[in-house]
Amino acid sequence: MSYATMNRSTWIADGLRWIGSVCESAADAIDRDAAYPQPLEPVPTRPAFEEYLYDVRFRIHNRI
């Protein structure tokens, strides 16, 4: 085996270790964020039922 071949295989092994460490860091970040999930859509300030009552109250007061 020549020196160039050994050097290339060392370079490839280091690259694979680096890729593995990036994947591991990404998995750790995902696990850390999973502990505190963020809503995918904005959460309404009022539940749907209260929004309906607010609308009915508004229509009654404005005689619509």
Image (cartoon, rainbow, N blue to C red):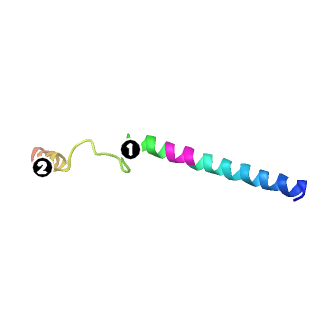
Q: Which residue: 36% across, 50% down?
A: 41
Q: Residue furthest front?
A: 1
Q: What amino acid is found at the position of numbered circle 2 in the picture?
A: Val
Which quadrant of the rendered structure holds the N terminus?
bottom right
> Which residue is identified by label 2?
56
Residue 59 at x, y percent in the picture: 13, 49
Work out whether residue 55 or residue 2 is closer to the camera in this orientation and state it: 2
Q: Residues within 10 Å of mark 2 (few under 14, many from 20)?
A: few
Residue 48 at x, y percent in the picture: 20, 50
Give the left or right position of residue 55, taking residue 39 as reference.
left
Magenta span covers which residues? 24-28
Residue 11 at x, y percent in the picture: 78, 51
User: Can you tell which quarter of the image residue 34 is in?
Assistant: top left
Give the left or right position of residue 6, taking residue 14 as reference.
right
Work out whether residue 25 or residue 38 is closer to the camera in this orientation and state it: 25
Residue 8 at x, y percent in the picture: 82, 55
Q: What amino acid is found at the position of numbered circle 1 in the picture?
A: Gln
> Which residue is identified by label 1?
38
Work out whether residue 39 or residue 12 is closer to the camera in this orientation and state it: 12
Q: Which residue: 11% across, 44% down?
A: 61
Give the left or right position of residue 16, taking residue 37 as reference.
right
Helix, strand or loop for disc 2 = helix
**Does the CB distance between marks 2 and 1 fall below 8 Å?**
no
The secondary structure making up most of the magenta span is helix
Up-down relation of residue 13 to residue 28 (above or below): below
Q: State which tag comes first along the sequence, 2 or 1.
A: 1
